[in-house]
Amino acid sequence: MRRLLLTVVLPLGLGCCTTGDPRDIGPGRARPVVEHRGDQIHPDLEGRWLVWFDLENDPNGACHSSLGDTQEYDYTCEGVVKSLDLITGREITLSEVLSEETQPVVSEGLVVWRCWQQGICGLCTSPVDRQENTFHSYANSYYYYDWTSRPAVDRGVTAWIEYSYQEGSQVYKLRSLELLTGHQADHPIDPYPSEVIVLGHRLAWVSTVWDQEVYHYRLESLDTLTGHHQILLDSEHAIQGLGGQGDLLAFKQDQGEDGVRVFYLDTDGQPVRADSDEARVSALTPISVDQDLLVWLDHREGDYQVAAYDLRGGQGGLISSDRSLIGARITPAVDSGQVVWADRRNGDWDLYLRNL
């Protein structure tokens, strides 16, 4: 097995602490919360608010798929970003019709999604309870982060990775934007970053470095207030699927013959494994993180299921039932002990909620 090199981080305080009773981790019944015509995909949660991408009015009700036995291809992906108040049942359309598959995020009552205006890529935002769109353009069109991925947003701050060519070499730049003020900042980083997340005023990302004839995968962080930069983890195993909230940072590692595994950093900055030996963790989606709950996709039983790990009780396992039919590339959402995922047990993708 390859060695694991670790730099412990105390000053940043990354890690987690939990209180409260253990949650009910195990297969259980989920209830449908959105069942419109067409696909309902890419959910995100914050408190009482659920947001997602609604394809009800797409001609085929789906995004870029084959059309049954004809083997024709569906070139349309026409949907809108919507929100739902889980307490009152009020549903709100937040965006104009979008023609690209879209993954919205809700943070601090603000919904954020990737969008285009007049050929310029950027972010659109709206309050979660009404349609009031604002467009934030990116300063550089050479956008490194996958366009269809979920934006990295937390507490009104978003971040992304850009690159440009200077004197025949690629120069990578980590950029952040305060959505309410419009203030942008550049943060120099080492070559070959792959993904970034926002944890309040801290940014965390993965970089790849060739050192001593071996690729090293580094989990790094930057405090944007103090400029303090640290390497949280240095490993020869690929790091991916970052997820975080508050002081909790989780990630996946591809450990070769042992498969993909789920870890989080404890209060001492040490990696703690969250999945079990029988788990078969999907590498296709990131980890979703609540204050004391990790959620990801697992295919130990063949089909994809939703798995969770409760930091309160140190227990983990599958939480969706064998009736569920879950996609490999649609990330579940979690907040306040509630988990929402896209499920096509009845044909179209619908959104189901399980309260843990």
Image (spheres, rainbow, N blue to C red):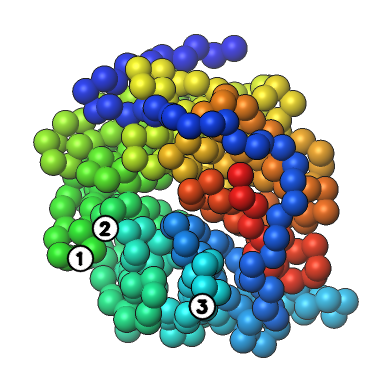
Asked which quadrant contains residue 62, the reply is bottom right
Q: Secondary structure at mark 3?
A: loop
**Quarter of the rendering occupied by the C terminus:** top right
How packed is label 1: few (under 14 Cα within 10 Å), some, or many (20 or more)? few
Residue holding disc 1: 180
Residue drawn at x 70%, y 81% is: 37
Residue that extends furthest to the right in the rendered view of this protein: 69
Q: Secondary structure at mark 2?
A: loop
How packed is label 2: few (under 14 Cα within 10 Å), some, or many (20 or more)? many
Sequence order check: which comes first, mark 2 or mark 1? 2
Asked which quadrant contains residue 55, the reply is bottom right
Residue holding disc 2: 156
Residue drawn at x 47%, y 81% is: 93
297 sits to left or right of 70? left
Residue holding disc 3: 90
Q: Are marks 2 and 1 in contact (CB under 8 Å)?
A: yes
Q: Position of residue 88 (x, y in %)?
A: 52, 73
Instruction: Compute the Cα span from label 3 to label 1.
Output: 26 Å
Asked which quadrant contains residue 143, the reply is bottom left
The correct choice, above or below, for 309 with respect to 273 in the image is below
Sequence order check: which comes first, mark 3 or mark 1? 3
Instruction: Compute the Cα span from label 2 to label 1.
Output: 7 Å
Instruction: Compute the Cα span from label 3 to label 2.
Output: 24 Å
Q: Nearer the viewer, residue 50 or 74?
A: 50
The correct choice, above or below, for 196 with respect to 96 in the image is above
For badge 2, the amino acid type reads Gly
Q: Position of residue 129 (x, y in %)?
A: 39, 75
For badge 3, the amino acid type reads Arg
